[in-house]
Amino acid sequence: MHFNHYGGSGTFLAADLLNCADFTPAVLRDLLTSHEMASRNLTTAQSAALATWVEGARPLFGEPDVTRQVTLVNALLTAVTTSVRVSMHDGNAPHLHYITGTDDPVERISAAIAGGLAVAVCGAGGGRLGRCSRLDCPIVYVDTSRNGRRRFCSTACANRVNVAAHRARSLPRP
């Protein structure tokens, strides 16, 4: 499945931030730059605020009930956006900007994430926002597979689950 550039950016950024173990300004600057975010230079306090805010997006990933996803994403949008505008800056094709009414980088990044997640829920029914099926694996992902049946964050997690299932089946039965 292909996500459009702007909505996809917020969606993939949400997953990468939720999987990020280090919320230092230097690490976030590189991550935000790779996702083409204009706001990318955060202070230590702003980095911590972003880490806290993005945790509110975690329940969207792996949530099977689209009604619950809509409720969650609407709460995120309400908290950080004031309006939506179509923009064509820097030679880019027309795309959506989720406006916050402030220049605070955390709020601007949060608005882009909330908007991207809204696009994912509306455009893909939310089923593409996944959580690894291996017990105790905290990794979330955006399923871009053709058939939308991804269950694991990586081949390593899938192999661990499959090997454990095979070993359990191979044990002698009492």
Image (cartoon, rainbow, N blue to C red):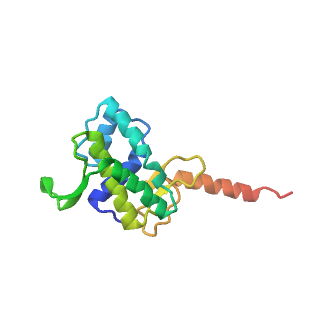
Answer left or right for 151 relative to 93: right
User: Which residue is most to the top?
Assistant: 44
Residue at x 13% of width, y 52% of height: 90
At which x and y percent is residue 148?
46, 66
Residue at x 32% of width, y 46% of height: 110
Q: Nearer the viewer, residue 168 or 23?
A: 23
Residue at x 46% of width, y 69% of height: 147
Q: Quadrant of residue 5?
A: bottom left
At which x and y percent is residue 153?
49, 53
The answer, for residue 67, to whether it is visible in the render is yes
Quadrant where the image shows the N terminus: bottom left
The answer, for residue 1, to whether it is visible in the render is no
At which x and y percent is residue 132?
53, 53
Answer left or right for 28 relative to 141: left
Quadrant where the image shows the C terminus: bottom right
Q: Is residue 7 above or below residue 58?
A: below
Q: Quadrant of residue 123?
A: bottom left
Q: Is residue 146 above or below residue 35?
A: below
User: Which residue is most to the right?
Assistant: 174
Answer left or right for 132 relative to 1: right
Q: Nearer the viewer, residue 73 or 117?
A: 73
At which x and y percent is residue 13?
35, 49
Q: Nearer the viewer, residue 54 or 152?
A: 54
Total numbered labels: 0
